[in-house]
Amino acid sequence: MMTGRLFPLLLSLAVGLAATAQTSMNVASRDAMLYEASCHLYEKGDTLTSVSMDMEWPEGLNGSVLPELQHCLTAFFFGQPSAGYREGWRNFQLQRGKEIRTMKDDRASVRRYCDMKLHCLWLEPGRYISFLACLEERGEQSVIASRHLYFTFDLIHQKILTQRDVFNQERLWRNAGIRYQFCEVLDTTSNAPLTDTVDWEHLPGQFALEGPYVRFDLGTDSVGGTYSLVSSEVIDVLFSRNFRRWLRQPLPAAGTAHLPDEAVYAALPADSVFPETMPRFEGNISEAVGQNLFYSDNHRESTPRGKVIVSFVIDVDGSLKDMVFLTVGNVVLNRAVAAALRSIHGWKPAMLHGRPVACRYNLPFIFCFR
C-alpha cells in the first residue's frame, strides 16, 4: 500500500484563536468518537488484574447516543449492558477492586490480564458503522477466555445487521452451485496462507460491511485475524431484496439535535473549570502533529477539506486522556491524528493556585495535501 503524509495547514494566528482551551463550556456536537489507549492495574484481595485498552468507541452519531449499540458494546466488553462507555467502564472497575500504580512483587498474588480492543472498520455516514471487537482474559499460564465479534450496526433502524438482513438464505445455504462458488471466493480472497482449518460448511458466520466490500470472518482464531475481504460486486447474487432496498433507502434528513455533554465529555473536578493559567504546548503543535501524522493515500477521496476537531483532557502531568473526535466522517484520518497526538510530548498543564489541574482542550485542524 502506498503511504503518504498529510500535513495540517494552520496559520499561526488561527491557531492562537481556535486552539484555545475551552474550560467553561464544551463544544456542542452531533457526532463523537472516543479514542482510548491506556493501561490500568487493579487489586482485589490477592488478585492483581492488568487491563489494556485500545478503543475507538462511538459516543454518538447524528445526534443520537445509539442506545442499542451502547448496550451491545458494553455487554461484550464489561459483562453487562450499560448506557455508554463511561458507565460500563465504571461498573467494570468496581468489580476489579482499587486501582494501583505498580504491580506488586508478591509471589502469592494471583495475576490476571485483560486485553480489550475495539476497531472501527468503516463508517458510511447516516447508514451504518462496522466494527471488530476483541476481548481476551489470561492467567499467568493460559488463556481463560477469548472472543471477538465482527458486526455492522444499521444507523437507520438502530440495529445490528444479521445474516437474514443481508443475504438470501436460500441461495446462500441451499443452492449447491452458488454455495460452492461462494466458498471458492472466500478461499481465494483469504488473508491466511493456509485455509485447511477453515470450517467451510458453516460459513459465513460473522461478517461486516466495509463500503464496496464485505469482510467474512473465517473463524480460525479467537481475534478475528483470518478473514476474506470480498467485493460486493462478486457476491451480488447472494444479497437479499431487503438488503438491496436498504442500500437504496434515502437517508433521514439531518436533524439539529446535539449529543448531551455527559455522553461526550468526561466529568472533571470543579477546580479545573476556571484555571488561572490555561494549558499550552511548548513548540508548534501543527508542526509536531504533521511530523508524526501518517495517512494512506488510498483514502484521499474521503478526506474532509475543512476542520477536524479533537477534544482531550490535559492531565496534571501533561499527559493526554479522554480523547474525543467531534468530526467522525473519516475514521482512518482520526485514527492517524490520535496516534500522532499520543506520540508527541510538550504539553504543560493548566495551573490554579500554583498547582497543576486537569483541563479540557479543544483543538481544530485544517488539513490539505501537498
Image (spheres, rainbow, N blue to C red):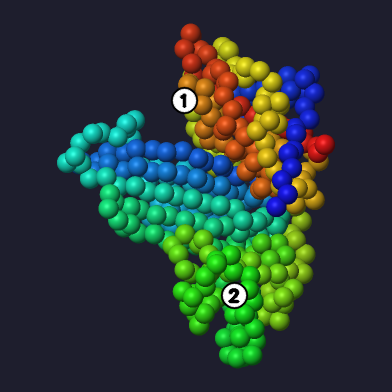
Q: Earlier in the sequence, mark 1 or mark 2?
A: 2
Q: Amino acid at mark 2?
A: Asp
Q: Position of residue 339 (x, y in %)?
A: 59, 38
Q: What residue lies at 49% left-to-right and 50% top-to-bottom?
A: 117
Question: Circle 2 sits on which residue?
Answer: 187
Q: Say which quarter of the image contains residue 190.
A: bottom right
103 on left or right of 202: left
Residue at 61 percent across and 86 percent down: it is 180
Residue occupying the far front of the picture: 193
Nearest-to-viewer mark from 1 and 2 = 2
Find residue 343 and report its image quarter. Answer: top right
Amino acid type indicated by mark 1: Pro
Q: Describe the element under mark 2 as helix, strand or loop.
A: helix
Residue at position x 72%, y 65% from top?
A: 212
Say above or below: 285 vs 36: above
Foreground residue among 108 and 320: 108
Give the residue number, with chain letter if any, for mark 1: 269
Instruction: Work out whether 15 lies above or below 118.
Output: above
> What is the residue that sits farthest to the top in this orientation?
354
Q: Position of residue 2 (x, y in %)?
A: 73, 49
- Residue at image point 62% right, 19% down: 281
Viewer-closest of 309 and 264 = 309
Q: Which mark is residue 320?
A: none
